C-alpha cells in the first residue's frame, strides 16, 4: 500500500485552474455548477477560503508558515 504524501497548500498560482476576472465571477460560477440547495453555503465556503488565502499571504510575507 502506498503512502499518500500531503503537501501544504500555499498561496501561489495553481496553473491547472483558471483565474477569473473577479471574486464575484467565482461565486457565480460555483453557485451555477454546484448542486447545493442553499447558495449561501457556497458563498460561505468561498469567502472562508478567501479570508484564509489572504491570511496565508500575510504569513508568507512575514516568514511565518
Image (cartoon, rainbow, N blue to C red):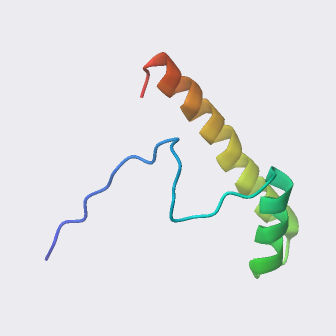
- Residue ranking furthest to the left: 1
46 or 23: nearer the eye? 23
- Residue ranking furthest to the bottom: 35
Residue at 25% x, 59% y is 5
Left or right, 24 with reference to 42: right
Residue 21, percent from left and from top: 79, 54
Residue at 83% x, 77% y is 32
Residue 42, percent from left and from top: 77, 64
- The reply to whether residue 36 is in sight is no
Q: Quadrant of residue 18?
A: bottom right
Residue at 65% x, 48% y is 49
Above or below 19: residue 60? above
- The reply to whether residue 38 is in sight is yes
Residue 33, percent from left and from top: 76, 79
Residue 11, percent from left and from top: 52, 41
Q: Quadrant of residue 3?
A: bottom left
35 or 61: nearer the eye? 61
- The quadrant in which the N terminus is found is bottom left
Left or right, 61 with reference to 49: left
Q: Quadrant of residue 63?
A: top left
Left or right, 11 with reference to 38: left
Above or below 2: residue 45? above
Above or below 30: residue 6? above
> How many numbered discs, if any?
0
Left or right, 56 with reference to 64: right
47 or 24: nearer the eye? 24
- The quadrant in which the C terminus is found is top left
Amino acid at each position: 500500500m502506498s503512502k499518500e504524501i500531503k503537501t501544504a497548500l500555499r498561496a501561489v498560482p495553481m496553473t491547472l485552474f483558471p483565474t477569473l476576472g473577479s471574486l464575484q465571477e467565482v461565486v457565480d460560477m460555483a453557485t451555477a455548477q454546484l448542486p447545493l440547495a442553499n447558495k449561501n453555503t457556497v458563498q460561505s465556503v468561498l469567502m472562508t477560503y478567501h479570508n484564509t488565502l489572504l491570511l496565508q499571504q500575510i504569513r508568507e510575507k512575514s516568514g511565518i508558515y
